[in-house]
Image (tube, rainbow, N blue to C red):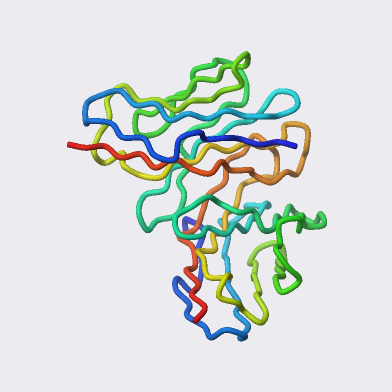
Amino acid sequence: AQSVAQPEDQVNVAEGNPLTVKCTYSVSGNPYLFWYVQYPNRGLQFLLKYITGDNLVKGSYGFEAEFNKSQTSFHLKKPSALVSDSALYFCAVRDPYSSASKIIFGSGTRLSIRP
Amino acid sequence: GAGVSQSPSNKVTEKGKDVELRCDPISGHTALYWYRQSLGQGLEFLIYFQGNSAPDKSGLPSDRFSAERTGGSVSTLTIQRTQQEDSAVYLCASSLAGGPNTEAFFGQGTRLTVV
Protein backbone atom coordinates (compact mmCIF):
# COMPACT_ATOMS: atom_id res chain seq x y z
CA ALA A 1 0.00 0.00 0.00
CA GLN A 2 1.13 3.52 -0.75
CA SER A 3 1.84 5.80 2.21
CA VAL A 4 3.71 8.89 3.28
CA ALA A 5 5.03 9.81 6.69
CA GLN A 6 5.73 13.22 8.14
CA PRO A 7 7.81 12.57 11.24
CA GLU A 8 7.51 16.05 12.71
CA ASP A 9 4.22 17.43 14.01
CA GLN A 10 5.74 20.89 14.40
CA VAL A 11 8.74 22.74 12.98
CA ASN A 12 9.87 26.07 14.39
CA VAL A 13 12.22 28.32 12.44
CA ALA A 14 13.38 31.91 12.80
CA GLU A 15 12.54 34.26 9.97
CA GLY A 16 15.35 34.43 7.42
CA ASN A 17 16.68 30.98 8.27
CA PRO A 18 16.39 28.00 5.94
CA LEU A 19 13.55 25.60 6.60
CA THR A 20 13.02 21.91 5.96
CA VAL A 21 9.80 19.93 6.36
CA LYS A 22 10.41 16.22 6.15
CA CYS A 23 8.49 13.57 4.24
CA THR A 24 9.25 9.92 3.57
CA TYR A 25 7.24 7.64 1.36
CA SER A 26 6.49 3.99 0.86
CA VAL A 27 5.45 3.21 -2.70
CA SER A 28 5.95 0.23 -4.95
CA GLY A 29 7.74 1.55 -8.00
CA ASN A 30 8.37 5.17 -8.82
CA PRO A 31 6.18 7.53 -6.83
CA TYR A 32 4.23 10.62 -7.75
CA LEU A 33 4.75 12.99 -4.84
CA PHE A 34 3.10 16.26 -3.90
CA TRP A 35 3.26 19.02 -1.32
CA TYR A 36 0.22 21.04 -0.27
CA VAL A 37 -0.09 23.95 2.15
CA GLN A 38 -3.04 24.95 4.29
CA TYR A 39 -3.17 28.48 5.65
CA PRO A 40 -5.41 29.15 8.67
CA ASN A 41 -9.11 28.75 7.91
CA ARG A 42 -8.45 28.04 4.26
CA GLY A 43 -8.48 25.06 1.95
CA LEU A 44 -5.40 23.25 0.74
CA GLN A 45 -3.25 24.78 -1.96
CA PHE A 46 -0.96 22.86 -4.28
CA LEU A 47 2.73 23.78 -3.89
CA LEU A 48 4.71 21.42 -6.10
CA LYS A 49 4.98 17.89 -7.41
CA TYR A 50 7.55 15.34 -8.47
CA ILE A 51 6.65 13.11 -11.39
CA THR A 52 9.92 12.36 -13.13
CA GLY A 53 13.09 14.09 -14.22
CA ASP A 54 15.15 16.42 -12.04
CA ASN A 55 15.23 15.44 -8.40
CA LEU A 56 14.98 19.08 -7.33
CA VAL A 57 11.51 20.44 -7.95
CA LYS A 58 10.65 24.12 -7.65
CA GLY A 59 7.19 25.30 -6.69
CA SER A 60 5.14 28.23 -5.49
CA TYR A 61 6.21 30.87 -2.94
CA GLY A 62 9.92 30.03 -3.29
CA PHE A 63 9.54 26.47 -2.03
CA GLU A 64 11.41 23.52 -3.47
CA ALA A 65 11.58 19.82 -2.71
CA GLU A 66 14.23 17.23 -3.28
CA PHE A 67 13.33 13.72 -4.34
CA ASN A 68 15.77 11.17 -2.94
CA LYS A 69 15.08 7.65 -4.13
CA SER A 70 17.70 5.92 -2.00
CA GLN A 71 16.32 7.52 1.16
CA THR A 72 12.69 7.39 -0.04
CA SER A 73 12.32 11.02 0.94
CA PHE A 74 10.76 14.16 -0.51
CA HIS A 75 11.66 16.94 1.90
CA LEU A 76 10.25 20.43 1.40
CA LYS A 77 12.75 23.27 1.65
CA LYS A 78 13.05 27.01 1.45
CA PRO A 79 16.31 28.95 1.69
CA SER A 80 14.92 31.85 3.72
CA ALA A 81 11.73 31.52 5.75
CA LEU A 82 9.08 34.22 5.99
CA VAL A 83 6.58 34.71 8.82
CA SER A 84 3.87 34.32 6.18
CA ASP A 85 5.08 30.75 5.54
CA SER A 86 3.54 29.72 8.86
CA ALA A 87 0.92 27.12 7.96
CA LEU A 88 0.12 23.42 7.93
CA TYR A 89 2.01 21.44 5.30
CA PHE A 90 0.98 18.10 3.85
CA CYS A 91 3.01 15.64 1.83
CA ALA A 92 1.00 13.36 -0.47
CA VAL A 93 1.47 10.44 -2.84
CA ARG A 94 -0.44 8.79 -5.65
CA ASP A 95 -0.07 5.33 -7.09
CA PRO A 96 1.84 5.71 -10.37
CA TYR A 97 0.47 2.48 -11.79
CA SER A 98 -3.18 3.23 -11.34
CA SER A 99 -5.09 5.24 -13.91
CA ALA A 100 -7.56 6.23 -11.22
CA SER A 101 -6.10 6.67 -7.81
CA LYS A 102 -6.88 8.58 -4.67
CA ILE A 103 -4.41 10.99 -3.11
CA ILE A 104 -2.91 9.74 0.14
CA PHE A 105 -1.85 12.46 2.56
CA GLY A 106 0.61 12.48 5.41
CA SER A 107 -0.45 13.60 8.87
CA GLY A 108 0.74 17.14 8.32
CA THR A 109 3.48 19.33 9.80
CA ARG A 110 2.74 22.66 11.38
CA LEU A 111 5.40 25.19 10.40
CA SER A 112 5.84 28.18 12.66
CA ILE A 113 8.12 31.02 11.64
CA ARG A 114 9.02 33.45 14.41
CA PRO A 115 9.97 37.05 13.59
CA GLY B 1 -16.43 30.14 -10.86
CA ALA B 2 -12.71 29.68 -11.09
CA GLY B 3 -12.29 27.33 -8.16
CA VAL B 4 -13.95 24.46 -6.35
CA SER B 5 -17.04 25.69 -4.57
CA GLN B 6 -18.50 24.06 -1.48
CA SER B 7 -21.73 24.80 0.30
CA PRO B 8 -22.66 25.50 2.95
CA SER B 9 -19.46 26.88 4.44
CA ASN B 10 -20.74 26.13 7.91
CA LYS B 11 -23.42 23.73 9.11
CA VAL B 12 -24.65 23.14 12.62
CA THR B 13 -27.00 20.22 13.01
CA GLU B 14 -28.57 18.25 15.80
CA LYS B 15 -27.45 14.73 16.52
CA GLY B 16 -29.53 12.25 14.57
CA LYS B 17 -30.41 14.60 11.70
CA ASP B 18 -29.31 14.07 8.11
CA VAL B 19 -27.08 16.56 6.31
CA GLU B 20 -26.12 17.15 2.70
CA LEU B 21 -22.90 18.83 1.68
CA ARG B 22 -22.44 20.08 -1.85
CA CYS B 23 -19.39 20.40 -4.05
CA ASP B 24 -19.12 22.17 -7.40
CA PRO B 25 -15.84 21.15 -9.04
CA ILE B 26 -13.86 23.20 -11.49
CA SER B 27 -15.49 23.03 -14.90
CA GLY B 28 -14.01 20.27 -17.03
CA HIS B 29 -12.43 18.40 -14.12
CA THR B 30 -13.27 14.74 -14.35
CA ALA B 31 -11.95 13.61 -10.99
CA LEU B 32 -13.57 14.58 -7.69
CA TYR B 33 -12.53 13.74 -4.14
CA TRP B 34 -14.00 14.09 -0.66
CA TYR B 35 -11.80 14.25 2.43
CA ARG B 36 -12.50 14.88 6.10
CA GLN B 37 -10.26 16.91 8.40
CA SER B 38 -10.74 16.99 12.15
CA LEU B 39 -9.49 19.93 14.25
CA GLY B 40 -6.75 21.02 11.80
CA GLN B 41 -5.34 17.54 11.71
CA GLY B 42 -4.64 15.19 8.84
CA LEU B 43 -6.86 14.47 5.89
CA GLU B 44 -8.97 11.33 5.92
CA PHE B 45 -9.92 10.05 2.48
CA LEU B 46 -13.64 9.40 2.04
CA ILE B 47 -14.53 8.83 -1.61
CA TYR B 48 -13.17 9.40 -5.12
CA PHE B 49 -15.02 9.77 -8.42
CA GLN B 50 -13.31 9.52 -11.79
CA GLY B 51 -15.37 10.03 -14.92
CA ASN B 52 -17.85 7.23 -15.48
CA SER B 53 -15.89 4.69 -13.47
CA ALA B 54 -17.29 3.18 -10.30
CA PRO B 55 -16.32 5.42 -7.40
CA ASP B 56 -13.70 4.38 -4.86
CA LYS B 57 -15.74 4.31 -1.66
CA SER B 58 -13.10 2.63 0.44
CA GLY B 59 -12.75 5.56 2.83
CA LEU B 60 -16.38 5.99 3.86
CA PRO B 61 -16.39 5.36 7.64
CA SER B 62 -19.84 3.81 7.90
CA ASP B 63 -23.00 3.13 5.94
CA ARG B 64 -24.36 6.43 7.23
CA PHE B 65 -22.11 8.13 4.69
CA SER B 66 -22.88 8.20 0.99
CA ALA B 67 -22.01 10.38 -1.97
CA GLU B 68 -23.12 10.80 -5.51
CA ARG B 69 -21.98 12.77 -8.47
CA THR B 70 -24.63 13.82 -10.94
CA GLY B 71 -23.82 14.34 -14.60
CA GLY B 72 -20.14 14.05 -13.93
CA SER B 73 -20.11 17.44 -12.22
CA VAL B 74 -21.75 18.41 -8.93
CA SER B 75 -21.31 16.05 -6.01
CA THR B 76 -23.31 15.67 -2.82
CA LEU B 77 -22.01 14.02 0.35
CA THR B 78 -24.83 12.83 2.60
CA ILE B 79 -24.45 11.90 6.24
CA GLN B 80 -27.46 10.22 7.78
CA ARG B 81 -28.27 10.17 11.48
CA THR B 82 -25.34 12.41 12.30
CA GLN B 83 -23.23 11.72 15.37
CA GLN B 84 -20.98 14.06 17.32
CA GLU B 85 -17.90 12.31 16.00
CA ASP B 86 -18.94 13.40 12.50
CA SER B 87 -18.01 16.97 13.44
CA ALA B 88 -15.16 17.99 11.14
CA VAL B 89 -14.30 20.04 8.08
CA TYR B 90 -15.32 18.24 4.91
CA LEU B 91 -13.09 19.11 1.97
CA CYS B 92 -13.85 18.55 -1.68
CA ALA B 93 -11.26 18.63 -4.45
CA SER B 94 -11.18 18.15 -8.19
CA SER B 95 -8.52 17.53 -10.79
CA LEU B 96 -8.39 17.79 -14.54
CA ALA B 97 -8.03 14.05 -14.93
CA GLY B 98 -7.68 11.08 -12.69
CA GLY B 99 -4.14 10.36 -13.79
CA PRO B 100 -1.71 10.02 -10.91
CA ASN B 101 0.47 12.89 -12.10
CA THR B 102 -2.24 15.52 -11.72
CA GLU B 103 -2.64 17.78 -8.72
CA ALA B 104 -5.96 18.42 -7.05
CA PHE B 105 -7.60 21.75 -6.35
CA PHE B 106 -9.43 22.05 -3.06
CA GLY B 107 -12.48 23.98 -1.98
CA GLN B 108 -12.70 25.98 1.23
CA GLY B 109 -14.52 23.18 2.97
CA THR B 110 -17.73 22.78 4.93
CA ARG B 111 -17.36 22.95 8.70
CA LEU B 112 -19.89 20.54 10.17
CA THR B 113 -20.76 20.75 13.84
CA VAL B 114 -23.07 18.15 15.35
CA VAL B 115 -24.59 19.21 18.65
- Left or right side of A12 for A99: right
Which residue: 48% across, 75% down?
Answer: B113
The answer to which of A94 and B38 lies nearer the viewer is B38
The N terminus of chain A lies in quadrant: top right
Left or right, B33 with respect to B84, comes to right
Residue placed furthest toward the left: A115
Where in the figure is residue B36, as x and y percent of width and height? Answer: 57, 59
Q: Please indicate, yes or no, whether residue A27 appears anywhere in the rendered image.
A: yes
Count of numbered circles in the view:
0
Residue at point 35%, 34% (across, down): A61
The percent position of residue A108, horizontal first and vertical second, equals 48, 43
Image quadrant for the C terminus of chain A? top left
Question: Residue A56, percent across and down?
Answer: 49, 18
Q: Is residue B42 above or below residue A21?
A: below
Above or below, A110 against B59 in this view is above
Residue A114: name its quadrant.
top left
Measuring from the top left, give residue A8's x and y in whole percent.
45, 35
* Residue A21: quadrant of the picture: top left
Residue at left offset 52%, top offset 35% = A6
Residue B70 in view: no
Which quadrant would residue A24 be assigned to in this image?
top right
Q: Residue at x 70, y 70 (%)?
A: B65
